[in-house]
Image: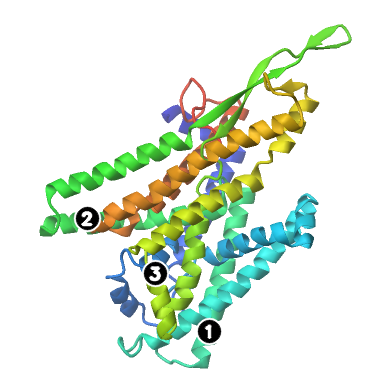
Amino acid sequence: MASGFTNIHKIPELRKRLLFTLGLLAIYRIGVFVTVPGVDRGVMKTIMAGASGTFLGLMNMFSGGALQQLSIFALGIMPYISASIIIQLLTVVVPHLEQLNKEGEAGRKKINQYTRYGTVFLALLQGYFIATWLEGQNLAYPGMVIDPGLGFRLVTMLSVTSGTIFIMWLGEQITERGIGNGISLIIFAGIVADLPDALTVLFRQFRRGDMGVLNLAIIMAIVVGVIAVITFCERAYRKIPVQYAKRVVGRRLYGGASSHLPLKLNMAGVIPPIFASSLLMFPAQIASFTESRWLQQFSSMFQPTDWRYNLIYVLLIVFFAFFYTAVTFNPKDVADNMKKQGGFIPGIRPGQRTAEYIDRVLTRITWGGAIYVAAVCVLPNMLQIRFNVPFYFGGTSLLIVVGVALDTVQQIEGHLITRHYEGLSGPRGPRLRGRRG
């Protein structure tokens, strides 16, 4: 492992990518402490002190603590994720978007542009509801907003929208010029940055006597167990045997080799819980930031402690696991490529039959992966409520942290192995495989 990290410095391109990624993540963390004009973040900290395990606590976790700071990054990257979900769903039903999706790189750029427009619209909408909610808090917490009115609402809307657009740009730059998926790394950085505070709160409860030694040991065992399960399942895959036919080219004989098609247990990675959380947070945010009585009652079912929230959360995770897998992996294309290269699955006719077989196997695997992700995201949260521990030790946050870390390490491994250096896994080669194997 030590020699693997030493090899990173021997590759100038990899070193630049890592430094570039760390630099942009540092800029993101600095921006978390830039407060929206005209508010008192000290009052907001008082409100957030008792918000662990609630909708506000969940939103604060995904924004990396920016909501507690009343930062220009208070919305985080969630408007961009919500816009991406909407555009991807519309791609299935709108012929124009479906055609753009089939046009390759040029079409994807156009779809990305539509996603950015949607991000601006959602950020402005959510920014308005945040501004009105902050003004409403002046009754219970005088001094929250220094000068309420139309001017404050416009400034807040523009500030948080600009912050979201800037975070979106940072994520795209990391993906293009850095290491790893930029959007996932930004969420990862926000969660990891607050873990020390969560540990401090946990051990403070222990020292005050609010938590016994047995309860603390159970919590630590649950956290370690969840991390172990996530690591094991994220590296699990199904091998489909592939045989290549022999062919003669000139005087040489090619082919005849045996290989396999690896299918990940969790093809969608951390996308399903991120998408599901974003979709649940959007209506809950709008409902909780208004004074309408029926909207307040509606928002009560979107609290992470409510059984209805967890049920909808599980259903959305399963849906997005299948949806994202279908978007990123096409069995028909895989079967066609195998046929062109002279490959076939033993006992399965090349072409359509092969595509149907791969699709059938992938469906069964995706069911297992979706159930695993849903269980990891929901069951630890229930135990967390039972023992009253900080929200950062929930299954969703642990899945994102471990999953993103494994993906990033795998990309670093790829750079090292490509240039014939020993990887991070040791002299026997890489043991971390990508999401597509």
Label at residue 387:
2
Sequence-first tag of 1 and 2: 1
Which element type, helix, strand or loop, lies under badge 2? helix
Name the residue type under label 2.
Phe
Q: Quadrant of residue 402?
A: top left
Name the residue type under label 3.
Met
Disc number lying in front (1 or 2): 2
Mark 3 neighbour density, 10 Å: few (under 14) some (14–19) many (20 or more):
some
Q: Is residue 216 above or below residue 249?
A: below
Label at residue 72:
none
Residue lying farthest to the right in this orientation = 250
Which element type, helix, strand or loop, lies under badge 3? loop
Residue 374 or 52: which is nearer the viewer? 374
Quadrant into which the N terminus falls: top left
**Which residue is drawn at the image coordinates 28% and 70% (left, top)?**
49
Residue 270 or 313: which is nearer the viewer? 313
